[in-house]
Image (cartoon, coloured by chain):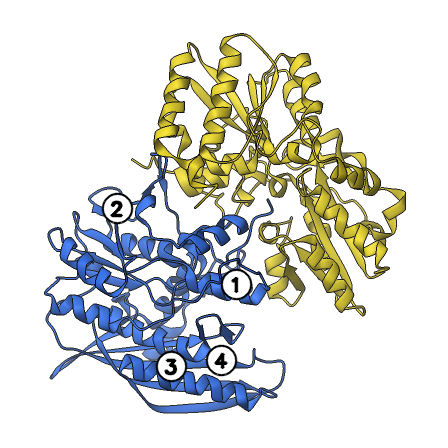
Chain colours: A blue, B yellow
Amino acid sequence: MNETKALEIACPLPLNDHRHIKLAHGGGGRMMQQLIEDVFVAAFDNPVLRGGHDGAVLEFPHGRSVLTTDSYVVRPLFFPGGDIGALAVNGTVNDLTMCGAEPLFLTASFILEEGLETEKLWRVVKSMRSAADAAGVSIVTGDTKVVERGHGDGMYINTSGVGRINHDTRVGPKRIAAGDVILVSGDIGRHGMAVMGEREGLAFTTPIESDCMPLWSTVHAMLSAGIDIHCMRDATRGGLCAVLNELARGSSLQFDVDERDIPISESVRGACEVLGLDATHVACEGRFVAIVPRGDEERALYVLKSQNESASMIGRVLDGEPGLVTIRTPIGGRRILDMPAGELLPRIC
Amino acid sequence: MKHVDEYRDPHAAQKLAQAIRKVVTQRWTIMEVCGGQTHAIVRFGIQDLLPDSVELVHGPGCPVCVTPLEMIDKALEIATRDDVIFCSFGDMVRVPGSRADLLGARARGADVRIVYTPLDAVRIAADNRDKQVVFFAVGFETTGPANAMAVHMAKTQGLRNFSALVSQALVPPAIEAIMSAPDTRVQGFLAAGHVCTVMGTHAYAPLAAKYGVPIVVTGFEPLDILQGLYRCVLQLEQRRAQVENQYERAVCEAGNTAAQALLERVFRVVTRKWRGIGEIGESGWALTPEYEAFDAEKRFGLADAEVSEPEICISGLVLQGLKKPADCPAFGKQCAPDHPLGATMVSGEGACAAYYRYRRKRAA
């Protein structure tokens, strides 16, 4: 009885603002954050969920494990530098990695649309196999459903993952402290621009390939080098900007970054300039932000650069305005780096 | 990146800022007309480099912001019809009308598509002959040629299922309206570079002379804006009021005459309403009789409706340079980019939205 009663909670989303779910609710920005906090956390609230991590860190008698899940709905299914299969493996592998766990096992659920060419399915599945091999994980169970034509973009994939934490470093937003150094593991925005370019038929002079890749080997190298990583998060939807804002909020500290130190390839910069987009809002699928204590930053950068030359130290954590992210502009001004609103929309002119 | 980094060089920026500090002897209020300039000023923190005596106020040159509520309601009315594919530039789809926005309409099943160029809408019309394809032709003189070309191409290709919902605005009448207001504070203008790329600069000399204001045609990169400001301040200090062209790499006096010829054929000048400001005579474009058949308002028989703005909103005063975003009691409270109350909060280029995103707390 009591349990039923506890679930009779009024829907907390401001109904007048959002009577229907909009695409922006999945865009990785403010609206998604609000949806998660006001609906999902409100309904499912428990100590593990409140950890606010990319995955759930579970304490077992024999040690800590991490469980995570993610769904992949990318259109088109194939894009320069990857496909939905590679994304479904690397995305979940990276969510485990960001909790400091060595990825071990994945599940794979397929929602297929009636009419999908089996050749395409086979290409995706082969790509998943090679991504899994590269990341050192096995796909150990799965599920298949087929929906009527017109009810899905060819194929949706959900993967869940289990990983093991075999070190003593505690990684999470609560460990971030004033004075910490903020690093990014490589140039940002490739994945989002590659997909947008393919989807919208934009021809870039220099082709932009997705940055989709597994991150465990990089993180493992950092941990093995004894770097006391305070927090990590991969920059997916909402890009670098969303990660910095989430972590500033999660740690109740101010983050201050320098725009000139943010690595962005020439082709991504060019495409963003033309479309009026902010590269820090554009999704990556193989880049992460690492926050390390002062004193560890040079070694951390050395390890990151050995994996990706474009890795960079981009800023510091300050004991300032809690939850605020500030950015120094190339001409020496300073402004707020605000959470992206939702869907990326090119400007008129 | 070539052709961009040169215009964002920190040392050159400091030098220009220093030059401004050197010539300025009193307070001056300068308006940048274009939303793209407002965006750059706030995004690059240009105000941080200026002396306190140079005050920037933000003009009405954001096409998204000044599109009247009634027009967005018309767009929604058309977009929610079953037989319509509604095409729009990206930042227009998030702008709320009096009840909903186009993204919301899409969530409820309307076929709303974001296009990168108006010609994409023409192509969609050619590929979907059983549907009415409507393009939301919004913008200033800058987008005019591409929008005009879309209508012209549809006519040439005989695409009877294409039409345009036209909400084009013109800069010089807006400057005139701002300067003729009795309580105006604006003493100098940075005119919108890309508008002048199309139209040339000759329309501005009479304005500079009539109102005694310097007008500097200015680009959009930080160094452009700082140089535009320097030249404007210098004129003010020397008590000159002339038209100068800072953006010579893209603007010539005559403008793009081929584009102007097309504009003249497709559009005629009309009086239009500006969101937040009201009606301004001869400040917009509508289709000429030759292209009238492609007018979406006529095709769908839409009537004008009166819609009122929230009383608390001061966006009209912000657009005229009389108030700053932070002067509004609703700023950042009832009014924010996710739930805007008025014109200047709806687009990233609106002054209120730019302040909210980049400066709502002193980024110190």
Q: Position of residue B243 (x, y in %)?
A: 62, 19
For marks 3 and 4, give the CA distance. Answer: 10 Å
Q: Three-letter amino acid code at disc 3?
A: Thr
Upstream in sequence: badge 2 or badge 4: 4
For marks 2 and 3, give the CA distance. Answer: 34 Å
Q: Chain of mark 4?
A: A
Q: Chain of mark 1?
A: A
Contact check, label 3 and label 4, Cβ < 8 Å: no
Upstream in sequence: badge 1 or badge 3: 3
The residue nearer to you, when weighing B249 against B267, is B249
Residue position marked by numbered label 2 in the rendering: A254
Q: Is residue A178 above or below residue A16?
A: above
What element does badge 4 sit on?
Answer: strand
* Residue displayed at 29% across by 49% down: A323
The residue nearer to you, when weighing B359 against B261, is B261
For marks 2 and 4, give the CA distance. Answer: 38 Å
On residue A156, the disc is 4
Can residue B303 be seen here?
yes
* Residue displayed at 80% across by 38% down: B261
Q: Position of residue A214 (x, y in %)?
A: 31, 73
Can residue A325 be seen here?
no
What element does badge 1 sit on?
Answer: helix
* Residue displayed at 80% across by 68% down: B129
Foreground disc of the pair 1, 3: 1
Q: Residue furthest right?
A: B289
Q: Position of residue B264 (x, y in %)?
A: 81, 37
What element does badge 3 sit on?
Answer: strand
What element does badge 2 sit on?
Answer: strand
Q: Are the numbered discs 2 and 4 placed on the same chain, yes or no?
A: yes
On residue A196, the disc is 1
